[in-house]
Amino acid sequence: MQNFPVFIDHPKSTIKVENKSLIINQPDQPKQSIPFTLISQLVIWGKVNVYSDVWRHLAEHGIGAVIFPRRGKGKPAFLGAGLTNSTSIRMSQYQAFKDNTLREQYSLKLIYQKFQSQQETLINLNLPPLPEDFPETPMPLDKLLGTEGLLARHYFSRLEGHLDPKWEFHGRNRKPPKDPFNALISLSYTLLTSVMQQTIERTGLDVWLGIFHQPYPGRPSLAVDLIEPMRPKIDLWVIHLLESYFNEQDFTTSKVDGCRLTKEARKIFYQQWANLNENFNKKQTLHQACFNYVNDFLMFLRILQHTPNIYPDLSKNSPF
């Protein structure tokens, strides 16, 4: 049986632990008892009462959690099991972070993989692909960030031509998102980041120290790095959701909170996200897909451990 994410979306819910299971009490609903061995991720929306030992049991089972604010303001909180005792791997990670040449090379690989995935999404939607002039040589990270941003603008401009005008999508925006497509991809990226964080922490890597993105308080930068190639796949999935499951009445919009799913519509989203967890890419679960990227980064670090003065060409061979 596949593990599945658990969503808590009622402000008067209480979560505690009994007999190696997560116990969820919600008003006017039967008590739920879910063994920790069946949970892949815990997602909490708003103010929920959580007994303190819940976090310890989640950590013991390697289960990541993400907590969203009830309203549009505020950032989500990511909680994980913390660092393991894999000191040698983290030492190699810190060594790579201090070496700009290594960071530039691996970052180029990640953005190249994202570029390829963007092309596949555009092709799947019968949209014109991006120009095939992706840079072949590493560059300073700030310049690569600008290149990635330019590609993203062209990519989302093409998606705008595909989306129904009723969704009022006119390019990427967030904090808060202004339209349904941006609202759904922002929510999905956050959940994906939590799954990637959980996968990273199981290996002993420091999830807060990225290779492309700079460290920032409260941001699991390595998880944000490693989901880059996966974002276009999420975009395609969100477009499918909008075309198959939602209409304009499933969203609310305000100047303060931006665009958000209604409570009833969130239930549909949760179910579809659970389905995506089980079948993300070529019969892989979402966790397996995340592990592929984490394992690739681990291989890169292991190369450094044995050949610290050799900078391998890492800009080819995307797994997509």
Image (spheres, rainbow, N blue to C red):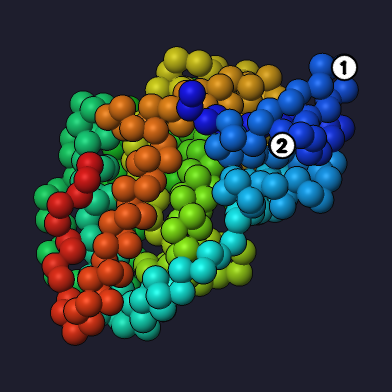
Q: Quarter-wise, where is residue 178 in the image?
A: top right
64 versus 146 height, above or below? above
Residue nearer the viewer, 56 or 313: 56
Label 2 neighbourhood size at 10 Å, few (<14), some (14-19), many (20+)?
Answer: few
What x and y, as percent, mark residue 200? 46, 56
135 versus 245 height, above or below? below
Please, what secondary structure does the residue beneath circle 2 have?
A: loop
103 versus 123 height, above or below? below
Whichever of callouts 1 and 2 sits on the residue coming sooner in the sequence is 2
Q: Are marks 1 and 2 in contact (CB under 8 Å)?
A: no
User: Residue shown at 50%/38% (left/top)?
Assistant: 188
User: Residue shown at 17%/61% (left/top)?
Assistant: 315
Q: Can residue 252 be spotted in the picture?
A: no
User: Residue shown at 34%/37% (left/top)?
Assistant: 233
Q: Quarter-wise, where is residue 140 in the image?
A: bottom left
Q: Which residue does the numbered mark 2 point to in the structure image? A: 20
249 left or right of 299?
right
Q: Which label is found at residue 28?
A: 1
User: Residue shown at 81%/43% (left/top)?
Assistant: 50
270 left or right of 125?
right
136 versus 56 height, above or below? below
What x and y, as percent, mark residue 56? 72, 52
Indicate which label's residue lies in the foreground, 1 or 2.
Answer: 2
What x and y, as percent, mark residue 12? 87, 32
Q: Quarter-wise, where is residue 299 in the image?
A: bottom left
157 left or right of 32?
left
Q: Amino acid at mark 1?
A: Asp
Q: Can residue 120 be spotted in the picture?
A: yes
Q: Amino acid at mark 2?
A: Lys
